[in-house]
Image (tube, rainbow, N blue to C red):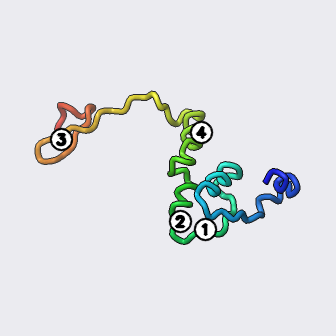
Amino acid sequence: MAAICERMGPLVDLLIWEAPLKNQQTYLIQQFGPNVNLGNIPTGEVLALEALRAGLRFETFYRIAAELERTGQWNPDAVEEPPAEPLPGGALQNSEQKGTRQ
């Protein structure tokens, strides 16, 4: 594959890579990005492939998480707010609204 990429240069983005197996799809997405041209995808795997491209599967999620952490949009060590507390009647109240009624 390296020889093909070297020979094609910037035109490598025009290639369509056959990748019927998930590990092939993962490798190509990691190498060329989520917009890589993939062919020979089983019809039952199209949605899974799109989730893979979007980084919604564990195989590619780490790239999104690393980018969010690098840009300061996500801190894996941050503590989340406690869940909202139920009020009588089923309404929710978060910790900032405690003691106030609307």
Q: Is residue 15 left or right of residue 6?
A: left
Among the two numbered marks 1 and 4 on one chain, the one whose residue lies closer to the N terminus: 1
Report, in whole angstroms, how far the alpha carbon at label 1 lies from the one at label 4. 28 Å
Label 3 CA crowd tier, 10 Å (few <14, some 14–19, many 20+): few
Between residue 69 and residue 92, name the one nearer to us. Answer: 69
User: Front-most of 42 and 36?
Assistant: 42
Depth check, mark 3 against mark 4: the one in front is 4
| Amino acid identity at mark 1 | Ile
For the residue marked with disc 3, what is the amino acid? Answer: Pro
Disc with the residue nearer the chain's start (2 vs 4): 2
The image quadrant that residue 1 belongs to is bottom right
Residue visible at 71% across and 52% down? 32
Whole-number angstrom distance, CA of label 2 to CA of label 3 = 41 Å
The CA distance from mark 3 to mark 4 is: 36 Å
Q: Residue at coordinates 55% horizontally, 33% vertically from top-left?
A: 72
Residue density around tag 4, few if under 14, some if 14–19, many if 20 or more, within 10 Å: few
Q: Using the image, tell me which numbered label, if any, was put on residue 86.
A: 3
The amino acid beneath tag 2 is Glu
Label 2 sits on residue: 45
